[in-house]
Image (cartoon, rainbow, N blue to C red):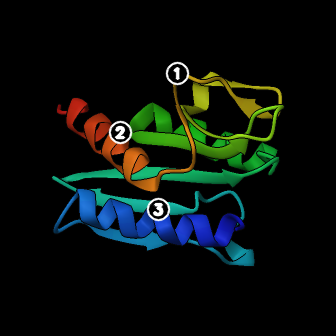
Amino acid sequence: MDEAVITKSLMAALNLAMPGGVGFKHFDVSTDGIPDISFTWAKRTLWVEVKYGEGEIRPGQLITMRRLGQTGIAYYVRFGFRLDGSPRTVIGTPFTFKGKDVLPPWETDGHDVRKVAAHLRSKMLEKVI
C-alpha cells in the first residue's frame, strides 16, 4: 500500500459516508501545497491532507492547511505505524501539528478508511454556522 492507494480508498469511503457529496483528489506538480482531497457536502467543504507511513508534511502544505483551517474545515490524516509495526491512523487539525507529525486528537488502530470517513463526516456536521 502507498499514499496514492490509501487516498483513493479514503475518497471512496467519503463518498459512501456522505452520499451526494462532491469530492476531488488533487495531485499535480502545479498543486504543491494544496491538500490531497477536497470534499463538499451539506454546503461545507472539507480539506484533507493524507500522509502514509513517514510521509513528510512540507512547509507549503502546513501554511496552506493552516489558512484553510482558519476559514474552513481542514484535517491531516496520517496512516502510520507504531514502533512495534502495528498500523494506526491519526487525524488532527493544522493547529495540532508538531515537528513532522500530527498530534493525535483522534486515533484508531489499523488503517480503516471507513472509520476515518465517519469521523470526518461528524466533524463536518459540527461546523454548522
Q: Residue at x 82, y 47 (%)?
A: 54
Sequence-wise first label, 2 or 1? 1
Which quadrant of the figure contains the N terminus?
A: bottom right
Q: Which residue is mark 2?
A: 119
Q: Is residue 61 above or below residue 96?
A: below
Query: Which of these two is toward me, 82 or 56?
Result: 82
Q: Is residue 121 left or right of residue 46?
A: left
Picture quarter containing residue 65? top right
As drawn, the label of residue 105 is 1
Q: What is the CA distance from the residue labelled 2 to the residue labelled 1?
A: 12 Å
Query: Which residue: 58% across, 57% down?
Result: 35
Q: CA distance from mark 1 to mark 3?
A: 19 Å
Q: Secondary structure at mark 3?
A: helix
Q: Residue 39 in the image: state x and y as whole percent.
A: 36, 60
Assess disc 3: are there few (<14), some (14-19) or many (≥20) residues with their C-alpha within 10 Å of its C-alpha.
Answer: many
In depth, the one of 17 and 70 nearer the eye is 17
